[in-house]
Image (cartoon, coloured by chain):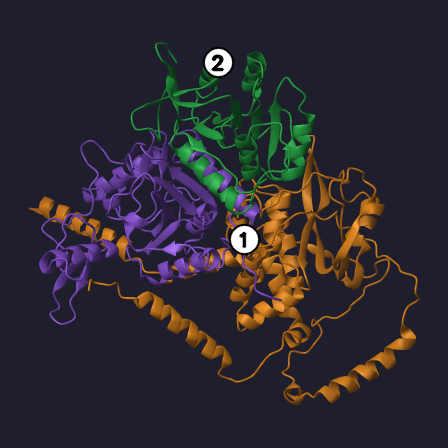
């Protein structure tokens, strides 16, 4: 018989995993993936956005497995994303081709095409609805039938209309600088690590997968005064956009050959920010610039906050942390921040022993000098 | 051909072994019988299949017709063919004239001080590489010194030495031969010709 | 949807990128090469950099050892081993000398490593200059210009304040006379093991997305002054209360019953082997 290592770690982990499963199952209730998918829209959208993977089914599974913990669900989906080969880039998505479900402008009372309120909790009274405790399937069916009947005569004509962008009208007036279309392929932050100064494509990618709370906080900080961006929301639009990929090894630019691979729901925000433009050193002119926000699913707060931060980072000269791209971009990722904060739970006794040794060394030195 | 999971892993480990121990020869093998024809050494295409993908670019240095190989590499790995001054990998086929290699050597990427990794990695074909010979190697990865023998001319070695003068800038080389052997010379290695100077 | 797991978890494209990065890291010793860094099934900050290196290196014939704080049985080490084994089926070991790959957090094993082994260190903060410069773009510039006066000044200030260098673990090193490098939070005791090491040492920071390396037989010097020398943790007159080892890194424990301070090998497999070999000597080869 020799000495054998105690399998303390292995056993502790096994027991802990069992306990975790017990906590998930002890209520003896099964939540169906489809239940999560059809009732937890906000949660699913948020998980997909922070995970940067659009797959409502898997997002629902992640939420179930994570027992509703946001950081865990995002983490699960991100880790899954790592195992998927990424073979193609989609064609540019034109958001004025969006199948709009909701579109509002805070800048103009009337916008061509009109304001379309769509589904929003903005005008709900935040009172707990105790009737939901006893909601039944029958009641849901009844409500839906009534709703369909009420709606059917009002259905719009079959002619599709596209809502053009609010900013287009202002561009015509010369209030926005016309920019050349920049078709440089975007840098992919999942294939190349972020280096500074970052390109705008890298900044936007980092912001759009940022943790909702973190992006909101920093956008809010800028708005309150720790930043120089005070936007007016030109337009918020929510809806489905089609995604196309070009056939591989195809050199022609003929869009007719593109494959339609599905549609994703997105929230897109264009904020209008007044900026002073300096011409010929002397003349100052006031113009608008656009802060851009976009994210998977319906998450308007995040998209608006992102549009603020996008503008902030376009102006690194301002001496606020919200205008510092390293400060903003390196601290908003859910998986990175939660991972590093939680790593403090790991044992650090070697490092502590080492520090202890040097503190003792210092004390000795002090005593020696005091004599 | 190559088993994309396990052969590539084995090839990479050999390359890593040789890159971290400049001058040490490794032999690359694939477990799957090849059905495709490659107009380069087996060690060359195994290295290519192991390291190339859509994220990298390459340039072939040769005096012969190279279109087919370019096309084949692009099809197998999705890597992009690029001009010599942009290529991440430079492939020198056996039998290429000294002057052609020297020109490529003078214009390839060597990185910059902020990003020294943005330098070309050279895959250079030899008829035969031999451990022990007229080239004395020293530097990180080598205990004191080691010697090797290559088919490359002295002036190419000298041109290489010119390009690594400003470390961390420089080029890293993977040398392959007809017997599926590889040997690496990273930019940290000092090469001296026996009985001569650097 | 079924669980399908690819050999060594990472898709082949990700491995290729990590492999290319590792080759660059070896060619530029001590320089932090950026890489994309995939999200792993374990948390960022829990060894994902080391894990990505391990998974890009590992083959069916490898024998893997994972340690955390010197211990094979530490929960995090167990967890990492479990993931690698689940996706590769490789053999695991606790014996340093039988391992081909050793992934470690915060220690270099006591048993000297050999040239057919690769040590993979997990790195929480790869930037040795971060303590005095928060910006990545600035530290990158400092490295490019070999401008390390800040690092020296930090040590100098400690001497001015405390009369001695007061660094704990992760004491910065100079690699190949070119780059100042964070050796990862290994104790100062382990720094000299990096110098002219027989084994290749790879360091991975997953969250900070950097890979760097020390090739074998490379000069690695701990930063210090001629008149204030680099000092490792001091275990003079102390020995392991289990195996009696001296000259190794010891953990300090308080005995539950006697309230006395005890010392014990931090490297648990090293201690175990010593215990077994002394037992062998004592009882002969009866049941060895």
Q: Nearer the viewer, mark 2 or mark 1?
A: 2
Quadrant in which residue A197 is drawn: top right
**What color does chain C have in the rendering?**
purple
Question: In the structure shown, which secondary structural element does the residue marked by tag 2 occupy?
Answer: loop
Q: Distance of mark 2 from mark 1, alpha carbons?
A: 63 Å
Q: Position of residue B102 (x, y in %)?
A: 55, 15
Does C226 sit above or below residue C212? above
Task: From the viewer's perspective, tell me whether residue C283 is left or right of residue C97.
Answer: left
Q: Is residue B154 visible?
A: yes
Please, which chain is the residue tagged with disc 2 on?
A: B
Asked whether C97 or A231 is in front, the reply is: C97
Q: Say which mark, if any, is on residue B153.
A: 2
User: Which chain wears orange?
Assistant: A
Q: Residues within 10 Å of mark 1 (few under 14, many from 20)?
A: some
State the residue at coordinates (39%, 44%): C203
User: Which chain wears green?
Assistant: B
Tag 1 residue: A226
Please, which chain is the residue tagged with disc 1 on?
A: A
State the residue at coordinates (39%, 19%): B191
Q: How many marks?
A: 2
Question: In the structure shown, which secondary structural element does the residue marked by tag 1 occupy?
Answer: loop
Q: Position of residue A244 (x, y in %)?
A: 76, 51
């Amino acid at each position: 018989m020799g000495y054998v290592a105690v399998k303390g770690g292995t056993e502790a982990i096994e027991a802990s995993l069992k306990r975790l499963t017990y906590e998930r199952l002890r209520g003896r209730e099964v939540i169906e993936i489809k239940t999560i998918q059809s009732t937890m829209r906000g949660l699913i959208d948020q998980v997909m956005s922070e995970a940067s993977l659009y797959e409502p089914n898997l997002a629902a599974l992640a939420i179930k497995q994570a027992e509703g913990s946001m950081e865990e669900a995002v983490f699960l989906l991100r880790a899954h994303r790592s195992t998927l080969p990424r073979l193609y880039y989609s064609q540019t998505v034109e958001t004025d081709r969006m199948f709009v479900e909701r579109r509002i402008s805070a800048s103009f009372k009337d916008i061509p095409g009109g304001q379309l309120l769509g589904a929003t909790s903005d005008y709900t009274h935040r009172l707990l609805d105790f009737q939901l405790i006893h909601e039944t399937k029958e009641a849901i069916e009844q409500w839906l039938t009534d709703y369909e009947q009420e709606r059917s005569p009002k259905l719009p004509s079959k002619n599709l209309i596209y809502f053009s962008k609010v900013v287009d009208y202002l561009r015509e007036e010369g209030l926005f600088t016309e920019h050349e279309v920049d078709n440089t392929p975007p840098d992919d932050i999942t294939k190349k690590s972020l280096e500074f100064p970052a390109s705008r494509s890298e900044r936007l990618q980092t912001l759009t997968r940022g943790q909702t709370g973190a992006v909101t906080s920093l956008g809010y900080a800028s708005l309150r005064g720790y930043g120089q961006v005070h936007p007016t929301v030109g337009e918020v639009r929510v809806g489905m956009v089609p995604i196309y990929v070009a056939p591989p090894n195809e050199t022609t630019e003929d869009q007719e050959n593109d494959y339609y691979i599905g549609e994703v729901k997105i929230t897109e925000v264009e904020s209008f920010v007044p900026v002073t433009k300096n011409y010929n050193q002397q003349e100052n002119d006031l113009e608008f610039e656009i802060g851009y926000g976009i994210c998977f699913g319906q998450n308007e707060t995040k998209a608006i906050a992102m549009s603020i931060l996008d503008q902030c980072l376009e102006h690194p000269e301002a001496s606020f942390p919200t205008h510092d791209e390293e400060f903003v971009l390196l601290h908003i990722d859910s998986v990175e921040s939660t991972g590093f904060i939680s790593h403090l739970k790991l044992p650090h006794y070697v490092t502590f022993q080492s520090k202890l040794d040097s503190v003792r060394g210092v004390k000795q030195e002090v005593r020696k000098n005091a004599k | 051909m190559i088993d994309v999971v396990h052969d590539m892993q084995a090839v990479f480990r050999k390359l890593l072994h040789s890159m971290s121990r400049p001058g040490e020869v490794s032999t690359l093998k694939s477990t799957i019988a090849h059905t495709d024809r490659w107009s380069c050494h087996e060690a060359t295409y195994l290295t290519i299949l192991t390291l190339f993908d859509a994220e990298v670019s390459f340039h072939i240095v040769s005096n012969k017709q190279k279109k087919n190989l370019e096309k084949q590499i692009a099809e197998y790995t999705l890597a992009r063919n690029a001009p010599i001054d942009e290529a991440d990998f430079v492939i020198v086929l056996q039998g290429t004239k000294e002057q052609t290699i020297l020109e490529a050597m003078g214009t390839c990427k060597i990185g910059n001080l902020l990003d020294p990794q943005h330098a070309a990695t050279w895959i250079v074909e030899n008829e035969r590489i031999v451990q022990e010979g007229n080239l004395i190697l020293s530097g990180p990865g080598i205990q004191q010194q080691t010697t090797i023998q290559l088919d490359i001319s002295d002036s190419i070695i000298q041109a290489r030495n010119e390009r690594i003068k400003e470390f961390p800038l420089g080029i890293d080389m993977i040398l392959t031969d007809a017997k599926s052997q590889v040997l690496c010379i990273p930019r940290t290695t000092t090469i001296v010709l026996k009985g001569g100077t650097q | 949807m079924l669980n399908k797991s690819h050999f060594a978890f990472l898709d082949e494209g990700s491995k290729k990128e990590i492999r290319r990065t590792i080759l660059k890291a070896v060619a530029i010793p001590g320089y932090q090469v950026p890489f994309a860094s995939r999200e792993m099934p374990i948390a960022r900050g829990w060894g994902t950099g080391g894990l990505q290196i391990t998974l890009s290196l590992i083959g069916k014939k490898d024998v893997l050892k994972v340690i955390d704080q010197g211990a094979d049985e530490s929960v995090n080490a167990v967890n990492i081993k479990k993931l690698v084994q689940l996706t590769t089926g490789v053999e695991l070991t606790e014996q340093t000398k039988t391992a081909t790959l050793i992934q470690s957090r915060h220690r270099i094993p006591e048993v000297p490593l050999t040239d057919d082994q690769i040590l993979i260190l997990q790195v929480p903060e790869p930037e040795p200059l971060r303590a005095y410069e928060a910006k990545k773009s600035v530290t990158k510039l400092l490295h490019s210009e070999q401008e390390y006066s800040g690092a020296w000044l930090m040590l100098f200030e400690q001497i001015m304040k405390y009369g001695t260098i007061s660094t704990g673990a992760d004491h910065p090193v100079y690699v190949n006379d070119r780059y100042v490098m964070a050796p990862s939070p290994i104790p100062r005791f382990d720094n000299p093991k990096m110098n002219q090491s027989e084994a290749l040492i790879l360091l991975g920071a997953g969250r900070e997305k950097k890979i760097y390396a020390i090739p074998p037989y490379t000069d690695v010097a701990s930063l210090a002054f001629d008149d204030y020398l680099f000092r490792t943790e001091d275990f003079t007159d102390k020995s392991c209360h289990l195996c009696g080892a001296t000259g190794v890194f010891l953990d300090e424990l308080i005995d539950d019953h006697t309230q006395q301070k005890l010392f014990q090998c931090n490297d648990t497999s090293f201690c175990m082997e010593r215990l077994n070999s002394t037992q062998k000597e004592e009882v002969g080869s009866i049941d060895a």
